[in-house]
């Protein structure tokens, strides 16, 4: 039987941890709050974010829900066609509006786009 030297995943684990930390900070949660949500010790969150601990699949699913991101945001290695963070923020805020208010927001966005063309 041959053994292959496979990468141990340290770099990937560290990159995932950084992405999870950035997502947590973006939504304004503390490590304590996230740990409470997942029902794990706060130190485990620190270890995940530093790449010292693997993330279980169910933990990643719950973190993605908490951070309002698709799981693929944390797992895809390919080119990202994700929206810029400020646009994502606007979309999250718009999603909380009523359908009537979203229509009004759309008209306002169109107004701003047309105004920019005139300049």
Image (tube, grey):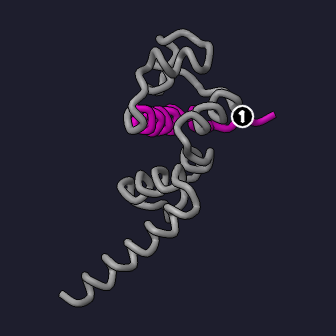
Image quadrant where residue 105 sits: bottom left
Q: Residue at x 61, y 50 (%)?
A: 72
User: Which residue position holds label 1?
Assistant: 3
- Above or below, 37 relative to 104: above
- Quadrant where the N terminus lies? top right
**In the image, farthest residue toward the front:** 100
Element marked by disc 1: loop
Most prominent secondary structure in the magenta stretch? helix
| 76 on left or right of 15 | right
Q: Residue at x 38, y 72 (%)?
A: 108
- The answer to which of 95 and 74 lies nearer the viewer is 95
In magenta segment, residue 105:
no
- The answer to which of 38 and 105 lies nearer the viewer is 105
Q: Give how far across and how far down residue 2 sits, in percent.
A: 76, 36
Q: Give how far across and how far down residue 110 sits, in percent.
A: 39, 78
| 76 on left or right of 31 | right
- The answer to which of 41 and 54 lies nearer the viewer is 41
- Above or below, 81 relative to 31: below
In magenta segment, residue 20:
yes
Q: Give how far across and how far down residue 48 sits, in percent.
A: 50, 24
- Provide the residue span drawn in magenta: 1-24
Q: How many marks?
A: 1
Q: Residue at x 35, y 55 (%)?
A: 86
- Above or below, 52 relative to 111: above
């Amino acid at each position: 039987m041959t053994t292959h030297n496979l990468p141990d995943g340290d770099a990937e684990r560290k990159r995932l941890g950084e992405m999870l930390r950035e997502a947590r900070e973006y939504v304004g949660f503390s490590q304590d709050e996230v740990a409470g949500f997942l029902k794990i010790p706060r130190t485990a969150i620190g270890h995940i974010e530093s790449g010292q601990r693997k993330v279980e699949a169910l933990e990643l699913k719950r973190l993605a829900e908490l951070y309002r991101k698709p799981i693929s945001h944390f797992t895809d290695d390919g080119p990202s066609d994700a929206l810029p963070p400020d646009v994502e923020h606007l979309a999250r805020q718009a999603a909380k509006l009523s359908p009537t208010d979203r229509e009004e927001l759309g008209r306002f966005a169109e107004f701003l786009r047309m105004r920019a063309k005139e300049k």
